[in-house]
Amino acid sequence: MTRSARRSPGRTAPVRYEFRVVGAVSAALGAAFPELTARAGLAAGTTFFGPVLDSAQLHGLLDRFHALGLTVVELRQLPD
């Protein structure tokens, strides 16, 4: 789930991801994800997006969404 940076072999570059969750997320709850940007979306959902360094961070974010009672309905890797 990571990509190698083209400039430097052996190093990884962050990959941008988008997480769509059910419902409107308050600013206080959104603050639990300082590494992501939150945006209220259409159809009463909220979208979080930002760089993810590796699969461990991706799984950590998914665990945090779950622990806070947020249901992720869509996860996608954004184009470069």
Image: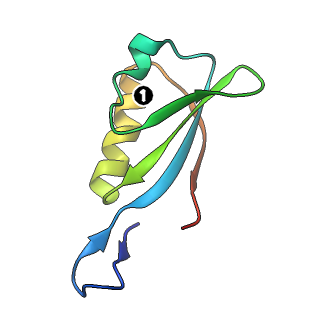
Residue 77 is drawn in which quadrant?
A: bottom right
Total marks placed: 1
Q: Residue furthest right?
A: 43
Q: Residue at x 50, y 23 (%)?
A: 70
How was this image coloured?
Answer: rainbow
Q: Which residue is mark 1?
A: 66
Q: Say if 12 sits above or below 6 in the image.
A: above
Q: Residue at x 59, y 65 (%)?
A: 79
> Where residue 44 appears, x then y in whole percent?
72, 19
Q: Residues within 10 Å of mark 1 (few under 14, many from 20)?
A: few
The quarter of the image holding the C terminus is: bottom right
Q: Is residue 68 left or right of residue 53?
A: right
Q: Residue at x 36, y 23 (%)?
A: 67
Q: Is residue 17 left or right of residue 22?
A: left
> Where residue 49 appears, x then y in whole percent?
50, 43
Q: Say if 4 sits above or below 41 in the image.
A: below
Q: Say if 69 sits above or below 21 in the image.
A: above
Q: Residue furthest left?
A: 10
Q: Residue at x 47, y 56 (%)?
A: 16
Residue 5 is drawn in which quadrant?
A: bottom left
> Where residue 56 appears, x then y in whole percent?
28, 53
> Where residue 36 appears, x then y in whole percent?
41, 38
**SS at badge 1:** helix
Q: Is residue 58 left or right of residue 38?
A: left
User: Camera-side residue: 55 or 34?
Assistant: 34
Q: Please, what is the three-letter code of the amino acid marked with disc 1? A: His
The quarter of the image holding the N terminus is: bottom left
